[in-house]
Image (cartoon, rainbow, N blue to C red):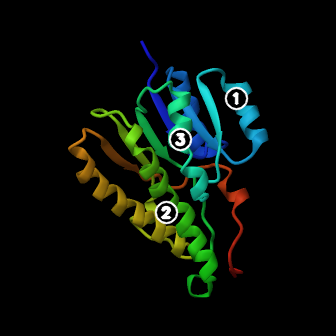
């Protein structure tokens, strides 16, 4: 039996890494994106033959355009069973003092990138039976202070997924949002405030 396959963005740590490990343990074929070559090599060594690392900055549109051919080659032309848009981060800021560039960067990473990747890989998804998963946040439903851009982006994920859920149901593709609350991951050590917060 051919292993089911999933493409996950941001598997170097946190929820993305835990998701990849769980699915690999259940014999899924995992294609996971990382930004650094050393992460790609380390995870490939650790996770074995069912894992394929893909170097990707999820905001690089020219690189995203290459994904369909790359994924098709890695899967030997077989359809992709699932897509999980996980990559993202928060940039804390006092919202009215946040730079426009910082706000735009947060929206680009947390909302536009998942849209762009979904758009690129949709043609490869199994029909019927494919699945698109967005990692949202409770901040997308109940906005957080000092996280205006993040909350706006995650609220946008709810809207994007809601539209796709209806549009793609005719293809037998299911769209879901998983909206976790606080999870103990390395995100806190990676984020840097966009403005001073006192």
The residue beneath circle 1 is 44
Do the numbered discs 2 and 3 sit on residues whose CB atoms are within 8 Å? no
What residue do we see at 42% from left, 52% from top? 119
On the image, the x and y values in percent for residue 174 come to 30, 42
Relative to 5, is 94 on the left or the right?
right
Q: Position of residue 138 (x, y in %)?
A: 44, 60
Choose between 83 and 141: the one closer to the eye: 83
Report the mark closest to the observer, 2 or 3.
2
Disc 3: which residue:
8
* Count of numbered badges drawn on the protein: 3
- The image quadrant that residue 83 belongs to is top left
Is 159 drawn above or below residue 182 in the view shown? below
38 with respect to 94 (left or right): right
Residue 140 figure quarter:
bottom left
Badge 2 crowding class, 10 Å Cα cut-off, few under 14, some 14 to 19, many 20 or more, is: some
Residue at disc 2, secondary structure:
helix
Real-space Cα separation, disc 1 to disc 2, in angstroms: 28 Å
Q: Quadrant of the N terminus?
A: top left
Quarter holding residue 142: bottom left
Q: Which residue is mark 2?
A: 112
**Is residue 160 in view from this perspective?**
yes
Helix, strand or loop at label 1? It is helix
Residue 195 vertical placement versus 179 (above, below): below
| 171 w.r.t. 110: above or below | above
Residue 37 location, x and y as percent? Answer: 76, 41
């Amino acid at each position: 039996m051919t292993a089911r396959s999933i493409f996950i963005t941001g598997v170097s740590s946190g929820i993305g890494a835990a998701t990849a490990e769980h699915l690999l343990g259940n014999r899924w074929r995992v294609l996971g994106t990382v930004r650094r070559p050393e992460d790609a090599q380390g995870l490939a060594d650790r996770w074995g033959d069912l894992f394929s690392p893909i170097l990707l900055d999820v905001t690089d549109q020219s690189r995203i355009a290459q994904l369909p051919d790359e994924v098709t080659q890695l899967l030997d032309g077989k359809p992709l069973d699932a897509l999980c848009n996980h990559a993202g981060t928060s940039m804390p800021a006092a919202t009215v003092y946040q730079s426009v560039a910082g706000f735009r960067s947060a929206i680009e990473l947390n909302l536009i990138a998942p849209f762009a990747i979904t758009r690129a890989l949709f043609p490869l998804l199994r029909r019927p039976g494919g699945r698109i998963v967005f990692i949202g946040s409770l901040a997308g439903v109940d906005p957080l202070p000092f996280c205006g851009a993040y909350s706006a982006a995650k609220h946008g994920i709810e809207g994007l997924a809601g539209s796709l859920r209806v549009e793609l149901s005719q293809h037998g593709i299911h769209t879901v949002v998983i909206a976790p609350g606080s999870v103990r991951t390395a995100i806190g050590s990676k984020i840097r405030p966009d403005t001073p917060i006192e």
